Amino acid sequence: MKRPGLLFMVFILLSASLPAQRNDPFLGITDEKVLPMLKHLPYRHGGMNVPAEDGRLLYDIILDKGYQKGLEIGTSNGYSALWLGIAFKKNGGNLITLEIEPKRAREAQENFEHAGLNDIIDSRINDALKEIPALEGKFDFVFIDAWKPDYIKYLELILPKMNHGGVITAHNVTSEGSSMRDFLEEIQQNPKLSTTIDRSSRAGVSISYVK
Ligand SMILES: C[S@@+](CC[C@H](N)C(=O)[O-])C[C@H]1O[C@@H](n2cnc3c(N)ncnc32)[C@H](O)[C@@H]1O
């Protein structure tokens, strides 16, 4: 077999071994208001948002585990929170999302309203380092996607507020790993956490289950 043919066969075999939603991150998303936003919002805002594949990864984790109480650190215009929000809506849960920049947070709030997710997503404008200590109750899902060198601080603040069996996820652990070495070391070595790294996007997502 010629080399291009062989490469094509390898590609087909690898594609077939991935879950179908990793080939099409929008597979099975039927919400008429949210679907167009999931498809088009990032392209209008230039790069700060998670790729759709990573949004889908987080959505699938929330649904698989039946999580109900979520926290996101770093809202921006709300793209990743839309993925999380529709998953929590399905589970009968809710999400708190934190953003330090008022202009971005207000844009996110408009997006949540447009998506019909206002009653699911509680969007707060504050420094996460100040807001997290004041949060009441426990969480079973956290997504960290804010200032990279502060990941270790977010982790230290959130760990005591996690339910057993919950998960702490974080974005850009591959693409910006050099800005968060202390965080990466901690999630691999902390005996209370069981961590894997999903490298299917260029950014990389850490997934740390709380024992
Ligand atoms: C990469 S963007 C988030 C993108 C978003 N998660 C998405 O995928 O749609 C990071 C955001 O974190 C915010 N941020 C940085 N430090 C923060 C802090 N200490 N507290 C809250 N938000 C913070 C930034 O203003 C920025 O909007």
Image (spheres, helix red, strand yellow):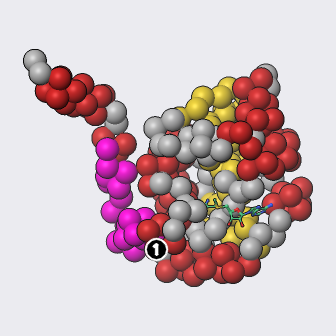
From which residue to which does the magenta span run? 23-41
The answer to whether one can see residue 167 in this image is no
Please state if 42 lies on the left or on the right of 109 as rendered.
left
Q: Quadrant of ligand 1?
A: bottom right
Judging depth in this view, the residue of 84 and 163 nearest the camera is 84
Q: Position of residue 91 (x, y in %)?
A: 53, 53
Where 5 falls versus 98 (above or below)? above
Q: Which residue is mark 1?
A: 44
Q: Is residue 31 magenta?
A: yes
Judging depth in this view, the residue of 169 and 2 nearest the camera is 2
Q: Residue furthest front?
A: 3
Q: Residue furthest left?
A: 1
Q: Residue at x 67, y 39 (%)?
A: 177
Please state if 134 lies on the left or on the right of 182 as rendered.
right
Q: Residue at x 69, y 80 (%)?
A: 103
Quarter of the figure that contains the N terminus: top left
Q: Position of residue 48 (x, y in %)?
A: 58, 62
Q: Is residue 138 magenta?
A: no
Please state if 111 lies on the left or on the right of 151 as rendered.
left
Q: Position of residue 178 (x, y in %)?
A: 71, 39
Q: Residue at x 81, y 50 (%)?
A: 150
Q: Quick one: label 1, few (<14), some, or many (20+) residues within 10 Å? A: few
Q: Residue at x 47, y 54 (%)?
A: 51
Name the secondary structure under disc 1.
helix
Please state if 68 lies on the left or on the right of 101 as rendered.
left
Q: Label 1 is placed on what type of residue?
A: Arg
Where 201 falls versus 2 (above or below)? below
Q: Can you tell which quarter of the image residue 120 is in?
A: bottom right
The answer to whether one can see residue 202 in this image is yes
Q: Position of residue 187 (x, y in %)?
A: 74, 31
